[in-house]
Each structure stands twice: as structure tokens, then as C-alpha cells.
Amino acid sequence: MPQSGAHLILAIDTALDDCSAAVFDARANLVLGKRTERIGRGHAERLPAVIDAALAEASSEFSDIAMIAVTIGPGSFTGVRVGVAAARGYALALAIPAIGVTTLEVMAEAVRRDTPVLAVHDAKRGEVYALLMGADGEILKAPEALDPAALVDFAGAAGERLVLAGSASGIAADLFGIERTATADPTSQIDVAVVARLVAEGRSQQPVKPLYLRNADAKPPSRHFNLFAEPT
Amino acid sequence: MTIAYRSEKCPVILGIETSCDETAAAVVARDEAGAPTILSNVVYSQIDDHAAFGGVVPEISARAHAEALDGIVTAALDEAGVTLSEVSAVAATAGPGLIGGLIVGSVMAKAIAHARGIPFLAVNHLEGHALTPRLTDGLAYPYLMLLVSGGHTQILLVRGLGDYERWGTTIDDALGEAFDKTAKLLGLGHPGGPMVERAAEDGDPKRFSFPRPMLREARLDFSFSGLKTSVRQAAEKNAPVSRQDVSDLAASFQAACADTIADRMDRAFARFRDMLPEIAAPTIAVAGGVAANQTIRHALETAARDAGFTLVAPPFRLCTDNGAMIAYAGLERFEAKMSDPLDTPVRSRWPLDRRAQPVIGYGRRGAKA
């Protein structure tokens, strides 16, 4: 198929445990090929083969791809960079655009029905990453790293009736109370088809830039002793 | 000059280097006369990002690579005046180095190669340095190589492509690392090499008698950790130190480094003569940021001249980390019909000479040196 006829989205996710790719037909609103491997680590090595598998299932080639969609975090720092570097590389090589999607909006969108969704992912070190999506799919609160105790404030009025998604939804359910929440499968991760769909529908338009939500661990050096009579 | 790029005879290689704190990309081609040509060589230094921390912070470096690399690659292609359809293969540093940056560089290189259906080449960073004199000076194999940088201190016999004998390495700190740590100790700032050199300019190199580590030992290895300790002890003894004290400490430290290098190279020259007597006009090539230090350069020049070796020092921007050296190593590998699969991992440790005995830290990831 000539480049001019390209209309497919190649979606990539390596931000959490999974290494996934999907080929999505935006016109037909159809997943043509999808491959997800729960590998935990080694995304950088595995990704090209996962993309090949998705392309093969879709009977497509790179020349059919019109756009790249990729998860940009929050997630594992290394995993996020693998996705971003790959997406930028494929976009550069194919001279097509790339669009970023946050992991949390994918989690929320995957379970959204007729109530707001709070996506909460365990960020370790006593924090969660959270995002609030309205019943209509609008992002009410963009991703933040929070103390779990701050989640009720974060959800605000939407906290009256919530669906919880993500690995920290258990923690959140305790805070909001069982009667106000329904909890989606907390072990489910990123559905790469949703990544593609959010971009196809024009709902995600983030630049392909890692969303870490946390600074790099680094401290300026402390001088062990002062060699100098006066501060230098 | 028009070159029939991407013909059998004139391959064009995109090279990517992200192993430490330079985000770099370059395009190198073989021209019709058979000479390698640097079409572009773009280096973005992250030095300001790390300055506050007195050294390279791996996570900050990985983040900066992820942010900058595709722009640097585009700049390298634009500057070279080539499109990706003219590129024959993509080479990237796959180790040794900081894992976060290596992943960013190799993933992007693989993505480009994958999407364009051209070969991917996983290049050893040290091979990039080792082959640079062939790119800049057209050196023929075999030759002797001294690599002195912030991460490496090695004496190599470069016999041929992929055929390297490591004759000596550091058993603790790299020479550039010793400069950085000394600069930090003396409050001279980062990067340490140029700062120590500047401070040493009006210093007395004989005032402090620092050890020449491993002098007169037959093995060609280096050790700079004890020297660094001696500098600290001398500084503490003289605290509070004056500006002149700092200059004298820097000059004395530098002199000890230069003497050590000269001693080790003397032995390397002799070994080369014994092993390869048929090479009438042997060459020693130097690479790495420390090669820019004038005191060390001078010691090296003297030692080489006395031993009848020609010293080849590529221009500074090709001595420090850059993409052109990776593209060139990729070019030689491409011409030798080599390529690497897209599941090739990056390696924080990756000795150039697989036969060399590990001198320190043989763990799960392999020998540290």
C-alpha cells in the first residue's frame, strides 16, 4: 500500500509490566492486530518482535502506518523511556506524527461506563499516581503523584460515586468506602487497543514526552570537610 | 562533491552515542575514493544538567537523552544533507556505559532500522574510540591505542576489526575519574579535567611528592585510587589551603599522572616491538577526554618519540564521546557484512577483549574492568 493511503495507528505500550503493540484502523474503529506480553522487564529487547507480531496479525506493513500512539507514563522510568524513544524513532523514520497517552487515562477509559473513574496506580514509597476521568471521558484531574490520604480531596465531588481502576484501587476503596465505589480488576494493566482508540478519537493529544511525576534521585554533593579557610 | 550514496561502494551510516553525558548523532560515509567522510557530527553535552551534582547522575542523564535524541538525529541527518532513504544502516552504542542512556540510544536506533528495513549495528563504545584513528588519519592495522577518559583507562593493541588485545586497564578509578575526584576535593568544580589543568598552571609540580602507582610493575595496569587518597591527605594536612596550595596540589597530582602514563607506555612500546618486530614505523593513537591535558600529552609525546613511535591524536571533538566514532565503527562492521538482531541487549559492562582476564568486579553483569 502506498504511503499516501496509510491510515492505521500503531500503538505501543512499555510503561508498566506489559510489552504491547496494536495496529488500529481508525476509519473502521477496529483493532486489526494486537500483541501483549507480560514480561515485567526486558521491554527494550522485546518490543520490535512484539510490533512485528501485531503488524503480521493485521497483515500490515510500516508503510500502512499513519500515526504512532504511545504511553508516556506515569510508570517505570526505564519503561517509559523505551516507549518514548521507540515512538520517536518510528515517527522519525516513517515521517509520521506520534502522540502520547498517559497510562492512567488508558486505565480509566478501559473501565468507564456511566460514572467518573479514579485511576490509581501504586507509585511505591508511600505514594500513588492518580487521575480522575469524568463519566463523559473528560479528564477532570490530570495525573499527579499523591499521598493516598489526599485521594478523597483529589476526587472532590466525583467521589460520591466512583469506579476505581489500577493497582492501588484497593487502597483507594478503603478510603472512599465500599458503598461509594466499584472496583475494576486491579491486576489489569494497559490495554494497548485503548491507547490507539484514545488517539484515534483525538481525545489524547499529549506530546511524546515522558511523564515521570517524580524527580530524579540526586543530591548535590555534601563536602565532607572544609579544606578552605573561607567558603569558596 | 556528489557521492553515489547507498551504493555497495559508498555506504552511509547513521551513528548514535548515548552511553554517558553526551547525546550525539553523526553521519559517516565511504566516499568513492574509498576514504571515510564525516558528513555531520552533532554533540549535545549535558554538562550543565549535572554541574550541580559534581558528576554525572545516571537518571538525569537518561532523561536528557530521551528528551534530546530524536532532535539530535534529525539535526545530524539535515547537516549531512541525507535522508533516511539514503542511509545504509544504523549503529548505536550498546555498551559499556550508563544503562539508562544506552537503552534510549539503542531503542531509537533499532526503531529507525526496523521501520526502514535496514541493518542495526550494536557498537562497543570502546571500539568506537579504538577505530577513530582510522577515520581521522587512515591508520592501518595494527596499532597501539591509549584510551584515557572519565570512564576508561586502557592500553589496547588494535590488530583488526573486532580483534583487540587489552594490555592494561585501571584496577580502580579511571584517569579522568581521578581528575574529577581531585577537582571536587579541591573545590575546583566540574568537569574536573580542565579545572585541575587550569589550577595546575601556576602550581609547583614538585612540591608534593605523590605516589606513582604501580611504577616499575611489569603488568601494564593502572591504579589511581591511592593517588587520589594521597592528594586528600596532603590537602587535609595543609588545611586551610590557600590558592597557591591548591595549584601546587593540582600540579603535583598531574605530574604523578603523567609519569605513570609515561612509564606504562614505555613498557607497552617495548612489548609491541617484541611482538611485532616487522612493523618498522609503529603508531600509538590516543583518545579520550584526558588526552586533551597538555602535561599528559607532552609526557606521551616524549615517551613515543624516544621509543620511535608516531603519536596520532585525533582532533579533540573526536577524542571525546561523539556519534562519528560510532558511525565509523558501524561502517567498518557493515562493510564486513556484520549486523545485530533487534533483540540485542545493551550492556553496562562489555570488555572489548573477551580473552582479557577480569581485574576487578566479576559479577552477574561481567567484569567491571
Image: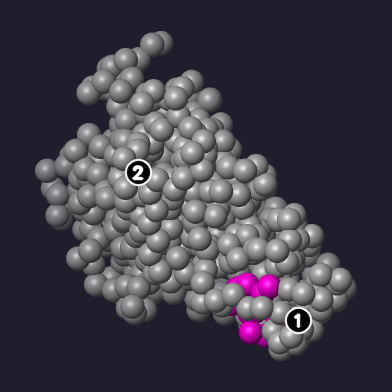
Please tell me whether residue A161 is drawn above or below residue A113 in the rendered image: below
Give the residue at x 40% y 61%: A36
Which amino acid type is marked by label 1?
Arg
Q: Position of residue B296 (x, y in %)?
A: 49, 53
Residue A180, label in figure:
1
Residue A86: tell me if it is visible. Answer: no
Which amino acid type is marked by label 2?
Ala
Name the residue that disc number 2 marks. A58
Residue B277 in magenta stretch: no
Q: Circle 1 marks a residue in which chain?
A: A
Earlier-in-chain disc, 1 versus 2: 2
Using the rendered view, name the quadrant where residue B262 is placed.
bottom left
The one nearer the camera, B45 or B89, is B89
Residue B220: tell me if it is visible. Answer: yes
Q: Residue furthest top?
A: B1
Q: Which residues are magenta?
A: A163-172
The one nearer the camera, B326 or A75, is A75
Q: Residues within 10 Å of mark 1 (few under 14, many from 20)?
A: few
Drawn side of residue B81 relative to residue A176, left or right: left
Give the residue at x 65% y 42%: A202
Q: Circle 2 marks a residue in which chain?
A: A
Q: Residue furthest left?
A: B278
Q: Position of residue B369 (x, y in %)?
A: 36, 70
Please tell me whether residue A167 is drawn above or below residue B102 in the rendered image: below
